Amino acid sequence: MAQMHVDTQSVQSGAGPEEEGGARRVSEYCKDQLTRGREELSFEELRAERYFLQRQKNDEERLQTLTEMKEKLSHELEEKRKLLLWRESQQVLQTPGSRPPAVSSEPRPDCPGGTSGDLHQSSVPQEPGSSSTSQLSPIQETSVEAGAWSLLEDQDQSQDQSQDQSQDQDQRQDQRQDQNQSQDQSQDQSQDQSQSQVQSQDQSQDQSQSQDQRQDQSQDQNQSQDQSQDQSQDQSQDQSQDQSQDQSQDQEEVEPGPVGGAVDACDPEARQQLLDICDVTSSPGFHCESGPLPPVDSFLQLGGDIYLIYSKVVDEEMFSIHNGATNDDNVLIKVERGRVPWDFHQFGRLKEKSSVDGLPRISCFLFLDGCITVYTSPPEHVFIELTESQDSAVRKALLLLQLVTELHARHVLHAALRPSILFASYRGLMNLERVFPVDWSSSVDLAVQQEVTSAQQLASAHSYIRVGLLEPTSPPQLVDLVGVAETVHVLLTSSRMVPVRDDHGWTADGFSQDKSCDMFPGTRTMWKAWRRFFRSLLNAGGRCSTSVLSDVTEQLSLL
Protein backbone atom coordinates (compact mmCIF):
# COMPACT_ATOMS: atom_id res chain seq x y z
CA MET A 1 0.00 0.00 0.00
CA ALA A 2 2.80 2.38 0.78
CA GLN A 3 4.40 1.60 -2.55
CA MET A 4 1.13 2.35 -4.44
CA HIS A 5 0.75 5.60 -2.52
CA VAL A 6 4.26 6.67 -3.53
CA ASP A 7 3.56 5.90 -7.22
CA THR A 8 0.31 7.88 -7.17
CA GLN A 9 2.03 10.87 -5.67
CA SER A 10 4.77 10.72 -8.26
CA VAL A 11 2.22 10.62 -11.10
CA GLN A 12 0.29 13.57 -9.72
CA SER A 13 3.41 15.63 -9.06
CA GLY A 14 4.44 15.44 -12.73
CA ALA A 15 8.12 14.70 -11.88
CA GLY A 16 10.14 12.95 -14.56
CA PRO A 17 12.94 10.76 -13.01
CA GLU A 18 12.16 9.31 -9.58
CA GLU A 19 14.41 7.81 -6.91
CA GLU A 20 13.14 4.77 -5.03
CA GLY A 21 15.23 2.31 -3.06
CA GLY A 22 18.38 3.61 -4.67
CA ALA A 23 17.02 2.84 -8.19
CA ARG A 24 16.23 5.52 -10.77
CA ARG A 25 12.90 5.28 -12.60
CA VAL A 26 11.85 7.36 -15.68
CA SER A 27 8.19 7.93 -16.56
CA GLU A 28 7.25 6.77 -20.07
CA TYR A 29 4.47 9.33 -20.58
CA CYS A 30 4.10 13.09 -20.28
CA LYS A 31 1.97 13.89 -17.27
CA ASP A 32 1.53 17.52 -18.37
CA GLN A 33 -0.22 16.41 -21.56
CA LEU A 34 -2.34 13.76 -19.86
CA THR A 35 -3.52 16.18 -17.16
CA ARG A 36 -3.88 19.31 -19.28
CA GLY A 37 -6.02 21.88 -17.52
CA ARG A 38 -9.03 20.39 -15.80
CA GLU A 39 -9.35 17.55 -18.32
CA GLU A 40 -7.49 14.31 -18.20
CA LEU A 41 -6.61 13.00 -21.69
CA SER A 42 -5.84 9.46 -22.73
CA PHE A 43 -3.18 8.31 -25.18
CA GLU A 44 -5.84 7.76 -27.87
CA GLU A 45 -7.16 11.30 -27.48
CA LEU A 46 -3.68 12.79 -27.76
CA ARG A 47 -2.95 10.65 -30.83
CA ALA A 48 -6.25 11.72 -32.43
CA GLU A 49 -5.49 15.37 -31.72
CA ARG A 50 -2.09 15.10 -33.40
CA TYR A 51 -3.68 13.29 -36.36
CA PHE A 52 -6.32 15.96 -36.93
CA LEU A 53 -3.79 18.78 -36.60
CA GLN A 54 -1.55 17.11 -39.18
CA ARG A 55 -4.55 16.47 -41.47
CA GLN A 56 -5.63 20.12 -41.22
CA LYS A 57 -2.11 21.22 -42.08
CA ASN A 58 -2.01 18.91 -45.11
CA ASP A 59 -5.38 20.19 -46.29
CA GLU A 60 -4.22 23.79 -46.01
CA GLU A 61 -1.05 23.05 -47.96
CA ARG A 62 -3.02 21.22 -50.65
CA LEU A 63 -5.53 24.07 -50.89
CA GLN A 64 -2.72 26.59 -51.25
CA THR A 65 -1.11 24.47 -53.98
CA LEU A 66 -4.38 24.18 -55.87
CA THR A 67 -4.99 27.93 -55.57
CA GLU A 68 -1.58 28.74 -56.98
CA MET A 69 -2.09 26.24 -59.80
CA LYS A 70 -5.51 27.73 -60.58
CA GLU A 71 -4.08 31.26 -60.74
CA LYS A 72 -1.30 30.06 -63.03
CA LEU A 73 -3.71 28.26 -65.37
CA SER A 74 -6.06 31.26 -65.43
CA HIS A 75 -3.18 33.53 -66.37
CA GLU A 76 -2.09 31.18 -69.17
CA LEU A 77 -5.68 30.87 -70.44
CA GLU A 78 -6.08 34.64 -70.48
CA GLU A 79 -2.85 35.05 -72.44
CA LYS A 80 -3.95 32.45 -75.01
CA ARG A 81 -7.37 34.04 -75.24
CA LYS A 82 -5.87 37.47 -75.93
CA LEU A 83 -3.63 35.96 -78.59
CA LEU A 84 -6.56 34.21 -80.28
CA LEU A 85 -8.71 37.33 -80.13
CA TRP A 86 -5.93 39.33 -81.74
CA ARG A 87 -5.49 36.74 -84.51
CA GLU A 88 -9.25 36.65 -85.15
CA SER A 89 -9.39 40.44 -85.29
CA GLN A 90 -6.57 40.45 -87.83
CA GLN A 91 -8.43 37.90 -89.95
CA VAL A 92 -11.61 39.99 -89.74
CA LEU A 93 -9.71 43.12 -90.78
CA GLN A 94 -7.81 41.38 -93.60
CA THR A 95 -10.77 39.46 -95.09
CA PRO A 96 -12.30 41.50 -97.94
CA GLY A 97 -15.83 40.14 -97.45
CA SER A 98 -15.92 41.07 -93.77
CA ARG A 99 -15.43 44.81 -94.27
CA PRO A 100 -18.44 47.03 -94.75
CA PRO A 101 -18.48 48.72 -98.18
CA ALA A 102 -16.99 52.13 -98.53
CA VAL A 103 -19.67 54.78 -98.55
CA SER A 104 -19.66 58.51 -98.64
CA SER A 105 -19.32 60.54 -95.47
CA GLU A 106 -22.51 62.47 -96.11
CA PRO A 107 -25.24 61.97 -93.48
CA ARG A 108 -27.96 59.49 -94.41
CA PRO A 109 -31.48 59.83 -93.04
CA ASP A 110 -32.01 56.07 -92.96
CA CYS A 111 -29.07 55.43 -90.62
CA PRO A 112 -29.79 56.38 -86.99
CA GLY A 113 -26.09 56.31 -86.19
CA GLY A 114 -25.28 59.45 -88.25
CA THR A 115 -22.71 59.45 -91.05
CA SER A 116 -21.74 56.08 -92.42
CA GLY A 117 -18.23 57.10 -93.43
CA ASP A 118 -17.11 57.35 -89.81
CA LEU A 119 -17.79 53.65 -89.37
CA HIS A 120 -15.37 52.51 -92.08
CA GLN A 121 -12.52 50.56 -90.51
CA SER A 122 -8.93 50.35 -91.63
CA SER A 123 -7.77 47.02 -93.04
CA VAL A 124 -4.10 47.45 -92.00
CA PRO A 125 -3.21 44.76 -89.42
CA GLN A 126 -1.78 46.12 -86.18
CA GLU A 127 -0.54 44.72 -82.90
CA PRO A 128 -2.94 43.86 -80.05
CA GLY A 129 -3.99 46.86 -78.00
CA SER A 130 -3.66 49.27 -80.98
CA SER A 131 -6.40 51.59 -82.15
CA SER A 132 -7.64 49.35 -85.00
CA THR A 133 -8.64 46.48 -82.74
CA SER A 134 -10.50 48.84 -80.44
CA GLN A 135 -12.62 50.07 -83.36
CA LEU A 136 -14.42 46.73 -83.75
CA SER A 137 -18.16 46.93 -83.15
CA PRO A 138 -19.60 45.10 -80.10
CA ILE A 139 -21.27 42.58 -82.43
CA GLN A 140 -17.90 41.76 -84.07
CA GLU A 141 -16.18 41.58 -80.66
CA THR A 142 -18.69 39.05 -79.38
CA SER A 143 -18.37 37.02 -82.59
CA VAL A 144 -14.56 37.06 -82.24
CA GLU A 145 -14.88 35.95 -78.64
CA ALA A 146 -17.20 33.12 -79.65
CA GLY A 147 -14.67 32.01 -82.29
CA ALA A 148 -11.87 32.14 -79.72
CA TRP A 149 -13.73 29.93 -77.30
CA SER A 150 -14.52 27.44 -80.06
CA LEU A 151 -10.81 27.34 -81.00
CA LEU A 152 -9.89 26.72 -77.37
CA GLU A 153 -12.37 23.86 -77.21
CA ASP A 154 -10.90 22.36 -80.40
CA GLN A 155 -7.40 22.58 -78.91
CA ASP A 156 -8.57 20.83 -75.74
CA GLN A 157 -10.18 18.06 -77.80
CA SER A 158 -7.03 17.58 -79.88
CA GLN A 159 -4.93 17.43 -76.69
CA ASP A 160 -7.26 14.80 -75.22
CA GLN A 161 -7.03 12.74 -78.41
CA SER A 162 -3.21 12.92 -78.43
CA GLN A 163 -3.16 11.84 -74.78
CA ASP A 164 -5.40 8.88 -75.55
CA GLN A 165 -3.16 7.87 -78.44
CA SER A 166 -0.05 8.08 -76.28
CA GLN A 167 -1.74 5.93 -73.62
CA ASP A 168 -2.63 3.31 -76.24
CA GLN A 169 0.98 3.25 -77.46
CA ASP A 170 2.25 2.79 -73.88
CA GLN A 171 -0.14 -0.12 -73.36
CA ARG A 172 1.05 -1.79 -76.58
CA GLN A 173 4.68 -1.41 -75.52
CA ASP A 174 3.90 -2.94 -72.12
CA GLN A 175 2.21 -5.89 -73.82
CA ARG A 176 5.23 -6.43 -76.07
CA GLN A 177 7.57 -6.31 -73.07
CA ASP A 178 5.44 -8.91 -71.28
CA GLN A 179 5.58 -11.16 -74.35
CA ASN A 180 9.37 -10.84 -74.55
CA GLN A 181 9.72 -11.68 -70.85
CA SER A 182 7.54 -14.76 -71.25
CA GLN A 183 9.64 -15.85 -74.23
CA ASP A 184 12.86 -15.40 -72.22
CA GLN A 185 11.43 -17.50 -69.38
CA SER A 186 10.46 -20.28 -71.78
CA GLN A 187 14.00 -20.23 -73.25
CA ASP A 188 15.58 -20.52 -69.79
CA GLN A 189 13.39 -23.48 -68.96
CA SER A 190 14.18 -25.19 -72.26
CA GLN A 191 17.97 -24.82 -71.65
CA ASP A 192 17.63 -26.82 -68.43
CA GLN A 193 16.17 -29.80 -70.32
CA SER A 194 18.06 -32.60 -72.02
CA GLN A 195 20.29 -32.20 -75.10
CA SER A 196 17.64 -33.87 -77.22
CA GLN A 197 15.56 -30.73 -76.96
CA VAL A 198 18.33 -28.35 -78.02
CA GLN A 199 17.38 -28.53 -81.66
CA SER A 200 13.75 -27.75 -80.88
CA GLN A 201 14.92 -24.80 -78.79
CA ASP A 202 16.97 -23.52 -81.70
CA GLN A 203 14.01 -23.88 -83.98
CA SER A 204 11.75 -22.04 -81.53
CA GLN A 205 14.36 -19.29 -81.19
CA ASP A 206 14.56 -19.02 -84.99
CA GLN A 207 10.77 -18.82 -85.16
CA SER A 208 10.67 -16.13 -82.47
CA GLN A 209 13.35 -14.18 -84.32
CA SER A 210 11.38 -14.47 -87.55
CA GLN A 211 8.27 -13.32 -85.70
CA ASP A 212 10.17 -10.33 -84.32
CA GLN A 213 11.41 -9.51 -87.78
CA ARG A 214 7.88 -9.79 -89.12
CA GLN A 215 6.62 -7.57 -86.30
CA ASP A 216 9.34 -5.03 -87.07
CA GLN A 217 8.48 -5.17 -90.76
CA SER A 218 4.75 -4.75 -89.99
CA GLN A 219 5.57 -1.79 -87.72
CA ASP A 220 7.68 -0.23 -90.46
CA GLN A 221 4.87 -0.79 -92.95
CA ASN A 222 2.33 0.77 -90.57
CA GLN A 223 4.57 3.77 -90.03
CA SER A 224 5.06 4.19 -93.76
CA GLN A 225 1.29 3.89 -94.30
CA ASP A 226 0.63 6.48 -91.57
CA GLN A 227 3.13 8.83 -93.16
CA SER A 228 1.60 8.32 -96.61
CA GLN A 229 -1.88 8.89 -95.18
CA ASP A 230 -0.74 12.07 -93.45
CA GLN A 231 0.85 13.29 -96.67
CA SER A 232 -2.28 12.46 -98.67
CA GLN A 233 -4.47 14.20 -96.09
CA ASP A 234 -2.23 17.28 -96.18
CA GLN A 235 -2.33 17.28 -99.96
CA SER A 236 -6.13 16.87 -100.01
CA GLN A 237 -6.52 19.65 -97.45
CA ASP A 238 -4.27 21.93 -99.50
CA GLN A 239 -6.22 21.09 -102.65
CA SER A 240 -9.57 21.67 -100.95
CA GLN A 241 -8.33 24.99 -99.56
CA ASP A 242 -7.09 26.03 -102.98
CA GLN A 243 -10.40 25.01 -104.54
CA SER A 244 -12.42 26.87 -101.91
CA GLN A 245 -10.26 29.95 -102.38
CA ASP A 246 -10.71 29.74 -106.14
CA GLN A 247 -14.46 29.29 -105.75
CA SER A 248 -14.71 32.21 -103.33
CA GLN A 249 -12.73 34.38 -105.74
CA ASP A 250 -14.96 33.31 -108.62
CA GLN A 251 -18.06 34.06 -106.57
CA GLU A 252 -16.69 37.47 -105.64
CA GLU A 253 -16.07 38.18 -109.31
CA VAL A 254 -19.41 36.80 -110.61
CA GLU A 255 -21.92 37.29 -107.82
CA PRO A 256 -22.84 40.80 -106.66
CA GLY A 257 -21.99 41.96 -103.17
CA PRO A 258 -24.48 41.90 -100.31
CA VAL A 259 -25.07 45.64 -100.49
CA GLY A 260 -25.64 46.03 -104.22
CA GLY A 261 -27.20 43.41 -106.49
CA ALA A 262 -29.90 40.76 -106.47
CA VAL A 263 -29.25 38.64 -103.39
CA ASP A 264 -31.35 37.12 -100.65
CA ALA A 265 -32.97 39.99 -98.78
CA CYS A 266 -32.89 37.97 -95.52
CA ASP A 267 -29.22 36.92 -95.73
CA PRO A 268 -27.73 37.25 -92.18
CA GLU A 269 -24.32 38.44 -93.40
CA ALA A 270 -25.84 41.13 -95.59
CA ARG A 271 -28.05 42.27 -92.72
CA GLN A 272 -25.07 42.35 -90.37
CA GLN A 273 -23.17 44.66 -92.72
CA LEU A 274 -26.18 46.95 -92.98
CA LEU A 275 -26.46 47.11 -89.20
CA ASP A 276 -22.75 47.93 -88.94
CA ILE A 277 -23.29 50.83 -91.32
CA CYS A 278 -26.31 52.11 -89.40
CA ASP A 279 -24.47 51.62 -86.05
CA VAL A 280 -27.40 49.92 -84.33
CA THR A 281 -25.22 49.08 -81.30
CA SER A 282 -25.17 52.75 -80.23
CA SER A 283 -28.97 52.90 -80.05
CA PRO A 284 -30.55 53.17 -76.57
CA GLY A 285 -31.78 49.86 -75.26
CA PHE A 286 -29.08 47.75 -76.96
CA HIS A 287 -26.88 45.58 -74.70
CA CYS A 288 -23.97 43.24 -75.55
CA GLU A 289 -23.55 40.22 -73.28
CA SER A 290 -20.43 38.04 -73.01
CA GLY A 291 -22.06 34.67 -72.40
CA PRO A 292 -24.42 32.26 -74.17
CA LEU A 293 -28.22 32.49 -74.24
CA PRO A 294 -29.70 31.94 -70.76
CA PRO A 295 -32.33 29.22 -70.28
CA VAL A 296 -35.93 30.45 -70.28
CA ASP A 297 -37.83 28.78 -67.43
CA SER A 298 -40.23 30.37 -64.97
CA PHE A 299 -38.11 33.53 -64.89
CA LEU A 300 -35.40 35.23 -66.91
CA GLN A 301 -32.74 37.70 -65.75
CA LEU A 302 -31.53 40.29 -68.28
CA GLY A 303 -29.47 43.39 -67.57
CA GLY A 304 -30.21 43.34 -63.85
CA ASP A 305 -34.01 42.98 -64.35
CA ILE A 306 -35.94 39.80 -63.57
CA TYR A 307 -38.78 38.85 -65.92
CA LEU A 308 -41.47 36.39 -64.86
CA ILE A 309 -42.40 34.01 -67.70
CA TYR A 310 -46.09 33.07 -67.93
CA SER A 311 -46.36 31.07 -71.16
CA LYS A 312 -44.85 30.39 -74.58
CA VAL A 313 -47.14 31.88 -77.22
CA VAL A 314 -45.06 31.09 -80.34
CA ASP A 315 -42.61 28.22 -80.81
CA GLU A 316 -40.89 27.97 -84.19
CA GLU A 317 -37.62 26.48 -85.40
CA MET A 318 -35.41 29.56 -85.15
CA PHE A 319 -37.19 31.57 -82.44
CA SER A 320 -39.77 31.47 -79.66
CA ILE A 321 -41.95 34.18 -78.10
CA HIS A 322 -42.87 34.23 -74.41
CA ASN A 323 -45.46 36.22 -72.47
CA GLY A 324 -44.32 37.60 -69.12
CA ALA A 325 -44.15 40.57 -66.77
CA THR A 326 -41.73 42.66 -64.75
CA ASN A 327 -42.86 44.86 -61.87
CA ASP A 328 -46.11 46.41 -63.16
CA ASP A 329 -45.35 46.10 -66.89
CA ASN A 330 -46.42 43.46 -69.37
CA VAL A 331 -43.61 42.12 -71.62
CA LEU A 332 -43.22 39.97 -74.72
CA ILE A 333 -39.83 38.26 -75.03
CA LYS A 334 -38.51 36.89 -78.31
CA VAL A 335 -35.59 34.44 -78.05
CA GLU A 336 -33.91 33.75 -81.39
CA ARG A 337 -30.86 31.67 -82.28
CA GLY A 338 -29.45 34.16 -84.76
CA ARG A 339 -26.99 36.86 -83.74
CA VAL A 340 -28.33 39.61 -86.01
CA PRO A 341 -30.53 42.12 -84.08
CA TRP A 342 -32.73 42.78 -87.12
CA ASP A 343 -35.99 42.97 -85.10
CA PHE A 344 -34.52 45.71 -82.91
CA HIS A 345 -33.54 47.74 -85.98
CA GLN A 346 -36.86 47.30 -87.81
CA PHE A 347 -39.05 48.11 -84.80
CA GLY A 348 -36.95 51.22 -84.26
CA ARG A 349 -37.71 52.21 -87.85
CA LEU A 350 -41.45 51.79 -87.12
CA LYS A 351 -41.24 54.04 -84.05
CA GLU A 352 -39.56 56.86 -85.96
CA LYS A 353 -41.80 59.97 -85.85
CA SER A 354 -44.66 57.91 -84.39
CA SER A 355 -47.23 60.10 -82.63
CA VAL A 356 -49.17 57.28 -80.95
CA ASP A 357 -47.92 56.23 -77.51
CA GLY A 358 -49.44 52.74 -77.66
CA LEU A 359 -46.29 51.16 -79.13
CA PRO A 360 -44.12 49.26 -76.65
CA ARG A 361 -40.61 50.09 -75.54
CA ILE A 362 -38.00 47.76 -77.01
CA SER A 363 -34.64 46.53 -75.78
CA CYS A 364 -32.19 44.01 -77.22
CA PHE A 365 -29.61 41.72 -75.56
CA LEU A 366 -26.98 40.24 -77.90
CA PHE A 367 -25.34 36.99 -76.70
CA LEU A 368 -22.62 34.79 -78.17
CA ASP A 369 -25.08 32.32 -79.69
CA GLY A 370 -28.30 34.30 -80.08
CA CYS A 371 -30.33 37.39 -79.40
CA ILE A 372 -33.22 38.31 -77.04
CA THR A 373 -35.64 41.13 -77.87
CA VAL A 374 -37.92 42.47 -75.12
CA TYR A 375 -41.12 44.42 -75.84
CA THR A 376 -42.26 46.31 -72.70
CA SER A 377 -45.76 47.77 -72.48
CA PRO A 378 -46.22 51.52 -71.95
CA PRO A 379 -47.68 52.64 -68.59
CA GLU A 380 -51.25 51.40 -68.00
CA HIS A 381 -51.12 49.19 -71.11
CA VAL A 382 -51.39 45.42 -71.56
CA PHE A 383 -50.65 43.10 -74.49
CA ILE A 384 -53.19 40.59 -75.83
CA GLU A 385 -52.92 38.25 -78.79
CA LEU A 386 -54.80 39.69 -81.73
CA THR A 387 -56.84 36.52 -82.19
CA GLU A 388 -57.91 36.68 -78.50
CA SER A 389 -59.08 40.30 -78.70
CA GLN A 390 -62.83 40.79 -78.24
CA ASP A 391 -62.99 43.96 -80.35
CA SER A 392 -64.78 43.96 -83.70
CA ALA A 393 -63.03 42.71 -86.80
CA VAL A 394 -63.49 46.16 -88.36
CA ARG A 395 -61.55 47.83 -85.52
CA LYS A 396 -58.72 45.30 -85.71
CA ALA A 397 -58.58 45.52 -89.52
CA LEU A 398 -58.34 49.34 -89.37
CA LEU A 399 -55.41 49.17 -86.92
CA LEU A 400 -53.70 46.57 -89.10
CA LEU A 401 -54.10 48.85 -92.13
CA GLN A 402 -52.67 51.72 -90.08
CA LEU A 403 -49.61 49.55 -89.19
CA VAL A 404 -48.89 48.66 -92.83
CA THR A 405 -49.43 52.27 -93.96
CA GLU A 406 -46.85 53.51 -91.43
CA LEU A 407 -44.37 50.80 -92.45
CA HIS A 408 -44.63 51.61 -96.16
CA ALA A 409 -44.34 55.34 -95.43
CA ARG A 410 -40.97 54.56 -93.76
CA HIS A 411 -39.91 52.27 -96.67
CA VAL A 412 -40.20 49.14 -94.53
CA LEU A 413 -41.84 45.86 -95.61
CA HIS A 414 -42.90 43.24 -93.11
CA ALA A 415 -43.45 40.59 -95.81
CA ALA A 416 -44.83 37.93 -93.43
CA LEU A 417 -47.94 39.26 -91.66
CA ARG A 418 -49.92 36.50 -89.92
CA PRO A 419 -52.15 36.36 -86.81
CA SER A 420 -49.74 34.31 -84.67
CA ILE A 421 -47.13 37.09 -84.44
CA LEU A 422 -49.54 40.06 -84.12
CA PHE A 423 -50.45 41.52 -80.73
CA ALA A 424 -52.89 44.20 -79.60
CA SER A 425 -51.94 46.96 -77.17
CA TYR A 426 -54.80 47.94 -74.84
CA ARG A 427 -55.03 50.90 -72.51
CA GLY A 428 -56.75 49.67 -69.38
CA LEU A 429 -58.23 46.50 -70.99
CA MET A 430 -60.91 48.54 -72.77
CA ASN A 431 -59.34 50.87 -75.33
CA LEU A 432 -57.59 49.10 -78.23
CA GLU A 433 -54.87 51.50 -79.43
CA ARG A 434 -52.31 49.63 -81.52
CA VAL A 435 -51.54 46.42 -83.40
CA PHE A 436 -47.86 45.48 -83.79
CA PRO A 437 -45.80 42.42 -84.82
CA VAL A 438 -43.19 40.76 -82.60
CA ASP A 439 -41.34 38.91 -85.39
CA TRP A 440 -39.49 40.73 -88.19
CA SER A 441 -37.49 37.81 -89.63
CA SER A 442 -38.75 38.30 -93.21
CA SER A 443 -38.91 42.11 -93.16
CA VAL A 444 -36.99 44.39 -95.52
CA ASP A 445 -35.70 47.93 -95.03
CA LEU A 446 -35.94 49.43 -98.51
CA ALA A 447 -34.07 52.53 -97.36
CA VAL A 448 -30.83 50.52 -97.15
CA GLN A 449 -31.78 47.41 -99.17
CA GLN A 450 -32.43 49.30 -102.35
CA GLU A 451 -31.67 46.23 -104.47
CA VAL A 452 -35.05 44.71 -103.52
CA THR A 453 -37.34 45.89 -106.33
CA SER A 454 -39.67 42.94 -107.07
CA ALA A 455 -41.74 40.36 -105.23
CA GLN A 456 -39.67 37.43 -106.54
CA GLN A 457 -36.76 38.56 -104.31
CA LEU A 458 -38.85 37.84 -101.18
CA ALA A 459 -39.01 34.21 -100.07
CA SER A 460 -42.45 34.74 -98.50
CA ALA A 461 -43.89 35.77 -101.90
CA HIS A 462 -43.00 32.57 -103.76
CA SER A 463 -46.24 30.81 -102.76
CA TYR A 464 -48.28 33.78 -104.06
CA ILE A 465 -46.34 33.76 -107.34
CA ARG A 466 -46.87 30.01 -107.85
CA VAL A 467 -50.67 30.31 -107.68
CA GLY A 468 -50.62 33.41 -109.89
CA LEU A 469 -51.80 35.84 -107.21
CA LEU A 470 -48.67 37.97 -107.78
CA GLU A 471 -46.39 38.40 -110.75
CA PRO A 472 -42.62 37.88 -110.30
CA THR A 473 -42.07 41.52 -111.24
CA SER A 474 -44.80 42.87 -108.94
CA PRO A 475 -43.78 45.57 -106.45
CA PRO A 476 -42.63 44.02 -103.16
CA GLN A 477 -45.14 46.15 -101.19
CA LEU A 478 -48.00 44.00 -102.55
CA VAL A 479 -46.82 41.11 -100.37
CA ASP A 480 -47.97 43.05 -97.29
CA LEU A 481 -51.37 43.70 -98.88
CA VAL A 482 -51.89 39.95 -99.34
CA GLY A 483 -50.72 39.43 -95.74
CA VAL A 484 -53.36 41.88 -94.49
CA ALA A 485 -56.06 40.04 -96.47
CA GLU A 486 -54.98 36.65 -95.05
CA THR A 487 -54.90 37.97 -91.47
CA VAL A 488 -58.31 39.63 -91.66
CA HIS A 489 -59.79 36.47 -93.22
CA VAL A 490 -58.63 34.47 -90.19
CA LEU A 491 -60.11 37.09 -87.84
CA LEU A 492 -63.46 36.91 -89.69
CA THR A 493 -63.84 33.19 -90.35
CA SER A 494 -61.21 31.50 -88.09
CA SER A 495 -59.97 29.70 -91.20
CA ARG A 496 -57.13 30.15 -93.66
CA MET A 497 -57.81 32.22 -96.77
CA VAL A 498 -58.05 30.34 -100.08
CA PRO A 499 -57.60 32.76 -103.01
CA VAL A 500 -59.91 32.10 -105.97
CA ARG A 501 -60.21 33.81 -109.31
CA ASP A 502 -63.43 34.70 -111.14
CA ASP A 503 -64.44 37.02 -113.97
CA HIS A 504 -63.66 40.10 -111.87
CA GLY A 505 -60.23 39.03 -110.59
CA TRP A 506 -58.89 37.56 -107.39
CA THR A 507 -60.85 37.32 -104.13
CA ALA A 508 -61.14 35.12 -101.03
CA ASP A 509 -63.17 31.94 -101.23
CA GLY A 510 -66.64 32.73 -99.85
CA PHE A 511 -66.56 36.40 -100.88
CA SER A 512 -67.14 36.12 -104.63
CA GLN A 513 -70.29 37.39 -106.32
CA ASP A 514 -71.77 33.96 -106.96
CA LYS A 515 -71.54 33.06 -103.27
CA SER A 516 -74.24 33.82 -100.72
CA CYS A 517 -73.53 35.80 -97.58
CA ASP A 518 -74.12 32.95 -95.13
CA MET A 519 -71.34 34.20 -92.85
CA PHE A 520 -73.20 37.48 -92.26
CA PRO A 521 -76.94 36.64 -92.17
CA GLY A 522 -79.15 39.71 -92.31
CA THR A 523 -76.16 42.04 -92.96
CA ARG A 524 -75.69 42.00 -96.70
CA THR A 525 -74.13 45.47 -96.57
CA MET A 526 -71.36 44.18 -94.26
CA TRP A 527 -70.71 41.23 -96.58
CA LYS A 528 -70.45 43.54 -99.61
CA ALA A 529 -68.00 45.77 -97.72
CA TRP A 530 -65.74 42.80 -96.92
CA ARG A 531 -66.01 41.60 -100.50
CA ARG A 532 -64.73 44.97 -101.75
CA PHE A 533 -62.04 44.80 -99.04
CA PHE A 534 -60.59 41.52 -100.35
CA ARG A 535 -60.90 42.47 -104.01
CA SER A 536 -59.09 45.77 -103.44
CA LEU A 537 -56.17 44.14 -101.64
CA LEU A 538 -55.78 41.12 -103.95
CA ASN A 539 -56.10 43.06 -107.23
CA ALA A 540 -53.81 46.03 -106.59
CA GLY A 541 -52.05 45.58 -109.94
CA GLY A 542 -49.69 48.44 -110.69
CA ARG A 543 -51.23 50.84 -108.15
CA CYS A 544 -49.21 52.33 -105.33
CA SER A 545 -49.63 50.42 -102.07
CA THR A 546 -50.28 53.58 -100.02
CA SER A 547 -53.11 54.53 -102.39
CA VAL A 548 -54.72 51.08 -102.07
CA LEU A 549 -54.39 51.16 -98.27
CA SER A 550 -55.93 54.63 -98.14
CA ASP A 551 -58.97 53.54 -100.21
CA VAL A 552 -59.53 50.38 -98.17
CA THR A 553 -59.23 52.30 -94.90
CA GLU A 554 -61.80 54.83 -96.10
CA GLN A 555 -64.24 52.04 -97.06
CA LEU A 556 -63.94 50.31 -93.68
CA SER A 557 -64.25 53.59 -91.79
CA LEU A 558 -67.82 53.93 -93.13
CA LEU A 559 -68.77 50.81 -91.18
Image (cartoon, rainbow, N blue to C red):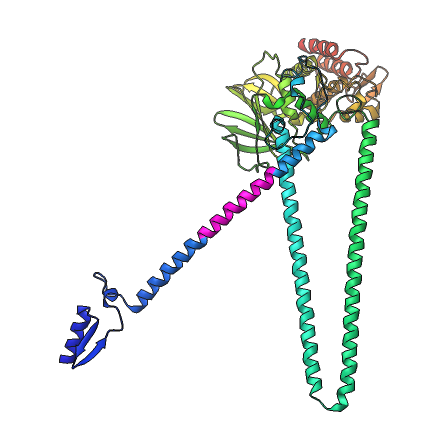
> Which residue corresponds to the image point at 59% horizontal and 22% vertical from the top-left?
282
Whole-percent x, y for residue 415 in the image: 73, 22
Above or below, comparing residue 27 to residue 440 in the picture: below
Write the start and end of the magenta stretch as one range: 63-82
Whole-percent x, y for residue 144 in the image: 64, 34
Above or below, comparing residue 42 to residue 105 in the picture: below
Image quadrant in which the N terminus is located: bottom left
On the question of residue 559 being in view, the answer is: no
How many numbered tags mark residues here?
0
Image quadrant in which the C terminus is located: top right
Is 439 in front, or is 114?
Answer: 114
Q: Residue furthest left?
A: 2
Above or below, comparing residue 159 to residue 254 in the picture: below
On the question of residue 458 being in view, the answer is: yes
Whole-percent x, y for residue 396 in the image: 64, 18
Above or below, comparing residue 67 to residue 5 in the picture: above
| Magenta residue check for 330 | no
Is 1 in front, or is 136?
Answer: 136
Whole-percent x, y for residue 438 in the image: 63, 25
Is 57 in front, or is 281?
Answer: 57
Q: Please, what is the dominant secondary structure of the magenta stretch?
A: helix
> Which residue corresponds to the image point at 64% horizontal and 52% vertical from the top-left?
160
Is 523 on the left-hand or right-hand side of 5? right
Is 95 on the left-hand or right-hand side of 5? right
When asked about the image quadrant of residue 62, the answer is bottom left
